[in-house]
Amino acid sequence: MSAQSLSIVISKLHQKRILTIILLVCFLFVSIVLGLAVGPLKIPALNTINILLDILNPFISNSHDHVQETVISSLRGPRVVLGVVTGAALAVSGACFQSLFRNPLADPGVIGVSAGAATAAVVYIVLGQGVMISLFGFAPKYALPVSAMLGALLAVVVLYLFVNRRGGIEVATLLLAGIALNAFCGSVTGILVFISDDQQLRELTFWTLGSLARAQWDSVIPVCILLIFVISILISKGNALNAFSLGEAEAYHLGFDVKRIKRSIVIFGAAAVGAAVALTGIIGFVGLVVPHIVRLLLGADNRYVLPASAIAGGGLILIADLFARIAVQPAEMPIGVITSLIGAPFFLYLLSRRRHLGLSI
């Protein structure tokens, strides 16, 4: 193939990727409009878009139905924003962990990171509120997200140290370690459920199922700022993760500081999962399903996979939340149930596919 032909192929591939990302942005926009419009009070899509544009551009004010505007700005708005950044955080962290571990089955939920974050949050709720509030007395509402982030970080560190002891990471070892972490965290949560009072028990039920129902601007805004920062850092590691797909030695010879990059991905990935879980509880399989779908559309280049995963993850969470809200009205189904219904069969498909290809499990 001549250099000119190769240049044409690369240009067409780049155009295809850009078009796919534009379509994903459109999917996210439609998901946002549906998330704001659909509910007990149904708001026409055009009204929803006009109200949304007015909120984003305060210098232009139009007359709208006051009730509709209040529902969008105060009730559904924080829920939709939290869903977008949570889906983005889980999807990007899942894509990063898959590239870091060089393992397509590495998902924050499957390998125990989400469970570690949720368990730390549960420990805070039942046992540690006095201690954490004394440490974060200037802003006690941040103590819960900090606890969840520390739990996620501890889970990732334990997992990485365990599965990387021999210089390589096997699929079976990673999965078994994730099962063990999830089992341990589940046992700790079970003990805390047993000793908790009625108010704490209601809080714990939320963490085990996952939901966006408790989103409020005063708690969503600081966590969203943190998540946007962390997601930006992770997306910037696309080139490094491409090198990691060749192996750590190869990445080192290409000029990357392997230890620093691994440390930053572990820390920021854990921060993303911990901050998301702190407000939503455990929402499983988003970090597994979304990166694989994106790679099928865009290829394996993490420079495109990471931002596209952020967009697709946000849209997927909003669609799952929409089903959770309308499936059993007037009650609300936990969003973690919806994502697990999608993710569990997909996980089994990936396992069966690896067996069909003759790869170890």
Image (spheres, rainbow, N blue to C red):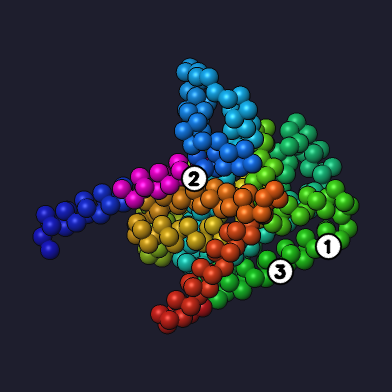
Mark 1 and 3 residues: CB-CB less than 8 Å, in contact? Answer: no
Tell me the SS state at disc 1: helix
Tell me the SS state at disc 3: helix
**Principal SS element in the magenta part?**
helix
Residue 103 position within the rendered picture, expressed as x and y whole percent measured from the top left: 48, 67
Marks 1 and 2 sit apart, C-alpha to C-alpha, by 38 Å
Q: Place residue 219 in its image quadrant.
A: top right
Amino acid on which the number 2 mark rests in the picture: Ser
Dot 3, crowdedness within 10 Å: few (<14), some or many (≥20)? some
Amino acid on which the number 3 mark rests in the picture: Ala
Q: Place residue 213 in its image quadrant.
A: top right
**Above or below 112: residue 48:** above
Q: Which of 179 and 285 is in front in this view?
A: 285
User: Which labelled disc corresponds to residue 31?
Assistant: 2
User: Which labelled disc corresponds to residue 183?
Assistant: 3
Residue 121 position within the rendered picture, expressed as x and y whole percent measured from the top left: 73, 51
- Residue 236 seen: no
Amino acid on which the number 1 mark rests in the picture: Ile
Residue 176 is left or right of residue 51, and the answer is: right
User: Which labelled disc corresponds to residue 327?
Assistant: none
- Residue 193 seen: yes
Q: Nearer the viewer, residue 5 or 84?
A: 84
Q: Looking at the image, is mark 1 or mark 2 earlier in the sequence?
A: 2
Residue 312 is left or right of residue 184, and the answer is: left
Q: Which of 202 and 118 is in front in this view?
A: 202
Mark closer to the observer (1, 2): 2
Q: Give the range drawn in magenta.
A: 19-32
Dot 1, crowdedness within 10 Å: few (<14), some or many (≥20)? few
Residue 88 is left or right of residue 332, and the answer is: left
Q: Looking at the image, is mark 2 or mark 3 earlier in the sequence?
A: 2
User: Which labelled disc corresponds to residue 191?
Assistant: 1
